[in-house]
Amino acid sequence: MKVIRVSEQGFCNGVRRALSLVEKAITENSEGKQIYILGDIINNRFVSEQFKKKGVITISSNNQSRLEMVKSVSKDSIVILTAHGVSPEVLNYLKNNKIEYIDASCLFVIDVHNRITKHLDQDFEIIYIGKHNHPESEGVLGINRRKIHIVTNVEDVRNLKVKSQNILIDTQTTLSNFYTKPIIDEIFIKYPEAILASGVCDATTKRQEALINEIKGDLCIVVGDVRSSNANELLKIGLNYMPTYLINSIEEIKKEWLDGVKVITLTSAASTPSILTDEIYEYLINYNT
């Protein structure tokens, strides 16, 4: 069996930075404070389990907002904010209560926050393309819940009622351009004077374009967590070409998928550790040998 590894895969810079900050916090925690991560540092349960072994507590959302989650931590702890970013409400709570925190927000996400804040100050309203209940969207909406309007599909745009003539279009960083394009097109039909500032990050785009350009064979496997937005976008792209499955471990591979398969395309999300992809690659190339 031949396995083609897509050239663009593995951790993006934002993920590397976030993980590095957690490791640094563990190493430099001379006072032995309890370290909390406000939600999964990245959307991959393998990574969360590794930090758990080092005594770091990841606070599961359980349908709570980041603000509700942060209120559950003790005042003498260290709180790490995830790569997804948080709302100003969360930052204000931490500062007002003098809780030590480390901001591991992705720099692309910070850019989106800064851009949106700047345009709000200039009396713009924001149409934000994102996914409901995603931590990145939650952080953006918390900037201004009255003037930021989230849309997830074309129908949402048709139901929008934005009266302002000054409109900025921005996006969740982990979406695909293929997902956002029809939504953006619909926004321009309804609000032709809107300004577009797509927040989709380069790492996300490069991984998606690489898969489109390099996919071939009989089967595509995407290595990533089911909660990962960019992993699910890669899954959608793969399904346009051939049977495609999203997995996070060898154990999730079903042998019937491999019956009669001669060539597999293998890719991974920006939040997927290389060790997972390497293990799955070795399993596949040695399958039935």
Image (cartoon, grey):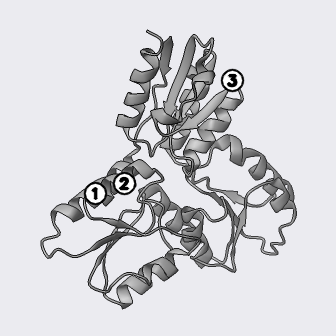
* Quadrant position of residue 156: bottom right
Q: Are marks 1 and 2 in contact (CB under 8 Å)?
A: yes
* Quadrant position of residue 237: top right
Element at label 2: helix
Examine the rendering and report whether any part of residue 85 can be seen.
Answer: yes
Residue 62 at what x, y percent from top left? 55, 70
Task: Using the numbered discs, state the Cα–Cα distance from disc 2 to disc 3 in whole angstroms.
Answer: 32 Å
Checking the image for residue 49, the label placed there is 2
194 up-or-down from 276: above or below: below
Q: Amino acid at mark 2?
A: Glu
Residue 31 at what x, y percent from top left? 14, 76
Which one is nearer the viewer's eye here, 272 or 72?
72
Label 3 neighbour load within 10 Å: few <14, some 14-19, many 20+: some
What residue lies at 49% left-to-right and 60% top-to-bottom? 109
Task: Using the numbered discs, state the Cα–Cα distance from disc 1 to disc 2 in whole angstroms.
Answer: 6 Å
What residue lies at 52% left-to-right and 69% top-to-bottom? 61
Q: Amino acid at mark 1?
A: Lys
Q: Which residue is mark 1?
A: 53
Q: Is residue 272 left or right of residue 226?
A: left
Q: Which residue is mark 3?
A: 242
Element at label 3: loop
Q: Is residue 128 left or right of residue 21?
A: right
